[in-house]
Image (cartoon, rainbow, N blue to C red):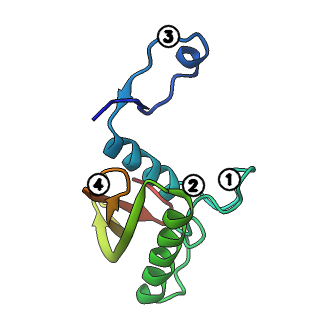
Amino acid sequence: MNNNYYALPLNAKKLISSDAHATCNLNESISHYIHLINTSYFGECTFDETFGCSIWIIDFDNLKSTTRLRDLIQNSLLDSLVRHEKRLHKIRVDVKIKQEEIFGTGDLNRIKKRIDIRINAKVTKTSEAFSYVEYFYIGPLSY
């Protein structure tokens, strides 16, 4: 498979000056794009208000039940992937939310919500299986 996709982070100076930029394969490019969708909030891209997902909306929401939060994130990610990642089809998104203790320095331990995201799909171009796993802590978001 050709490595004709730019790797992240993009180096604008190399792109403008036509220098060689690091490349990646198709699956890595798709993974980078999914991460970009996951970490963008709706409206952040002024040319497309629908780009992003709802993780940012619920980042500090302690009022909704875990089930409602999970469903909101899962549906939001699926909608965004179907709308924006045309290189995938038969997309399935599974989100799990759990409480996790974060050990800090001294006696400063915190409880945060951890969001585990698993995406399975088929690559449209090759019909190969595609799998993506990522997790975030929310309140505030970190990864």
Instruction: Report the residue that reaches farthest toward the right.
Output: 46
Which quadrant does the N terminus fall into?
Answer: top left
Q: Which residue is mark 2?
A: 40
Amino acid type, label 2: Ser
Labels 2 & 1 near each other (Cβ < 8 A):
yes
Labels 3 & 4 near each other (Cβ < 8 A):
no
Task: Answer left or right for 122 relative to 11.
Answer: left
Depth check, mark 3 against mark 2: the one in front is 3
Would residue 111 be visible to someone looking at this image?
Answer: no
Q: Which residue is mark 3?
A: 19
Depth check, mark 1 against mark 3: the one in front is 3
Say which of 89 and 40 sits in front.
Answer: 89
Q: Nearer the N terminus, badge 1 or badge 3?
A: 3
Cα–Cα span, label 1 and label 3: 29 Å
Residue at 31% from the left image edge and 55% from the top image edge: 104
Q: Nearer the N terminus, badge 4 or badge 2?
A: 2
Amino acid type, label 1: Glu
Residue 106, numbered circle = 4
**Residue 91, image x, y percentages:** 38, 69
Cα–Cα span, label 2 and label 1: 7 Å
Depth check, mark 4 against mark 1: the one in front is 1
Residue at 66% from the left image edge and 63% from the top image edge: 50
Q: Nearer the N terminus, badge 4 or badge 1?
A: 1
Give neighbour class at mark 4: few <14, some 14-19, many 20+ (Cα, 10 Å). few
Question: To which quarter of the image does residue 21 belong?
Answer: top left
Q: Nearer the N terminus, badge 3 or badge 4?
A: 3
Labels 4 & 1 near each other (Cβ < 8 A):
no
Amino acid type, label 3: Asp
Cα–Cα span, label 4 and label 2: 33 Å
Say which of 126 and 17 sits in front.
Answer: 126
**Residue 63, image x, y percentages:** 54, 86
